[in-house]
Amino acid sequence: MTVTEDTTPVSHFERIGGASSVKTAVELFYERVLADPELAGYFAEVEMAGQRRHLAQMLTVVLGGPNEYTGRDLATAHQPLNIPVAHYVRVGEHLTATLTQLGVPGDVITDVQAVLAQVQDQVVAGGDRADA
């Protein structure tokens, strides 16, 4: 069988509408997070335009889009913040709610949640696990 555009699997990135959809998701996600009194403090000193750009690039990679991420790795960026598991879980809930609100298919959301579980140890303080 010859692989053509018709037989090439479509990435989650393409399925949800590409870069414009990721940008919309990131905007809505940060509206939710910054309105959350338990999480907003993490971003008090953060330049949010750059933060949004980094998350959009990372989410694009997670969804199978082009990898243009050039920021710090997750552990380097997050370990100094001493993020407890409860806050990590809360951020994941905001991301899931955002994707659900935007009508992202369930299998895509499940895959994003799987990535969140895989990288949790790189983000939370002391590598604590929500499922431990």
Image (spheres, grey):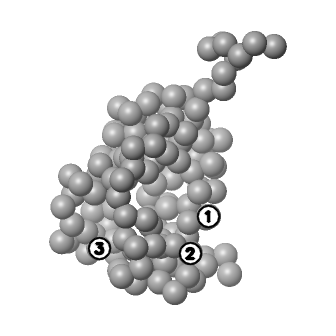
Q: Position of residue 6 (x, y in %)?
A: 66, 13
Q: Position of residue 48 (x, y in %)?
A: 21, 57
Q: Position of residue 103 (x, y in %)?
A: 50, 36
Mark 1 burial class by Cα count in 10 Å: few <14, some 14-19, many 20+: few
Residue found at the very far bottom of the displayed protein: 126
The numbered mark at residue 22 is none
Image vertical order of residue 22 relative to residue 84, above or below: above
Q: Are the residues at dot 1 and dot 2 in contact (C-beta closer than 8 Å)?
A: no
Q: Secondary structure at mark 2?
A: helix
**Label 3, on which residue?**
42
Residue found at the very far right of the displayed protein: 1
**Label 2, on which residue?**
121
Spatial separation of the CA atoms under disc 2 and disc 3 = 18 Å
Report the amino acid beneath label 1.
Gln
Residue at the location (66% across, 13% down)?
4
Closer to the camera, 64 or 101?
Answer: 64
Report the amino acid beneath label 3.
Tyr
Displayed quadrant of residue 2? top right
